[in-house]
Image: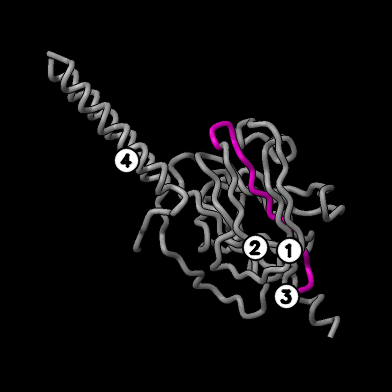
Amino acid sequence: MKVKIHHEGENILLMLFLIILATGALAYWFFDYKPVAWGLIALMAILFLLVLNFFRLPRRHFKGDNSDGTAIVSSVDGTVVALEEVYEDEYLHRNCIQLSVFMTVFNVHANWVPAKGEITYYKHHSGRFLAANLPKSSSDNERSSIVIRTATGDEILVRQIAGAIARRIVTYVEQGETVDVNDFIGFIKFGSRVDIFLPLDTKILVKLGDRTWGGETLVARLNNKKKTENR
């Protein structure tokens, strides 16, 4: 699988490299005991590799069947931490199945579009920076909400949520835009989670604790009967 660096990380990595280069040169110059200087340089190199790993961007393409537009694909790499019926009160105003995937700093942090359809709503909310694996992070943290109207006529809400470390959410899609599961919905920097709010008759294909891969893992199927009945 080919991997490149996400454009969100290019400037950060360049600045970090220059800082490490300058700090390493000064350490080597000023420390008479060279093992200390080399140890510091090694620690900074490890830091750079960790940040480089965070901004990696695998090239992925959903290989499953989505000819009927019912596929719900994980937006992110991570672990399923919530799977329950809740009342979504920002836009949908109804009971939904909330499917949440939590990302650590070691996961890919690009966010893929989870369903094929049209963007009907987008809003960014300022908020707190609680640990993203906590339930209250969905409503209290810095977050962006995106609604997709699917081919089945359903509207699903996708919520990008900042965490205790993540301090910036980037959303690429705009209202009125047509999207597919191979498109990117955005990026969240340094640890966070994504919630997907689905209709109650959705067939869920994952369970709590399951690992998911963004743009690849089929996590649910929408009920296609409504579309057929409305013809």
Name the residue that disc number 4 marks: 49
Task: Choose the circle earlier in sequence order: 4 or 3.
Answer: 4
> SS class of the residue under badge 2?
strand
Q: Nearer the viewer, mark 1 or mark 3?
A: 3
The residue carrying pointer 1 sits among few (fewer than 14), some (14 to 19) or many (20 or more) residues within 10 Å by Cα, namely: some
**Kind of residue at disc 2:** Ala
Residue under the point 40% across and 51% down: 56
Name the residue that disc number 1 marks: 202
- Look at the image and tell me whether residue 203 can be seen: yes
> SS class of the residue under badge 3?
loop
Query: Within the image, what quadrant is residue 218 found in?
Result: bottom right
Q: Nearer the viewer, mark 4 or mark 1?
A: 4
Task: Choose the circle earlier in sequence order: 4 or 1.
Answer: 4
Task: Choose the circle earlier in sequence order: 3 or 2.
Answer: 3
Q: Nearer the viewer, mark 3 or mark 2?
A: 3
Q: Nearer the viewer, mark 2 or mark 4?
A: 4
Residue under the point 36% across and 57% down: 4
Magenta-drawn segment: 151-166
Residue under the point 42% across and 56% down: 57
Residue lying farthest top? 32
Expressed as whole percent of the image width and height from the top left, the position of residue 43 reads 28, 28
Name the residue that disc number 2 marks: 220
Q: CA distance from mark 4 to mark 3?
A: 42 Å
Q: CA distance from mark 2 to mark 1?
A: 7 Å
**Kind of residue at disc 1:** Thr
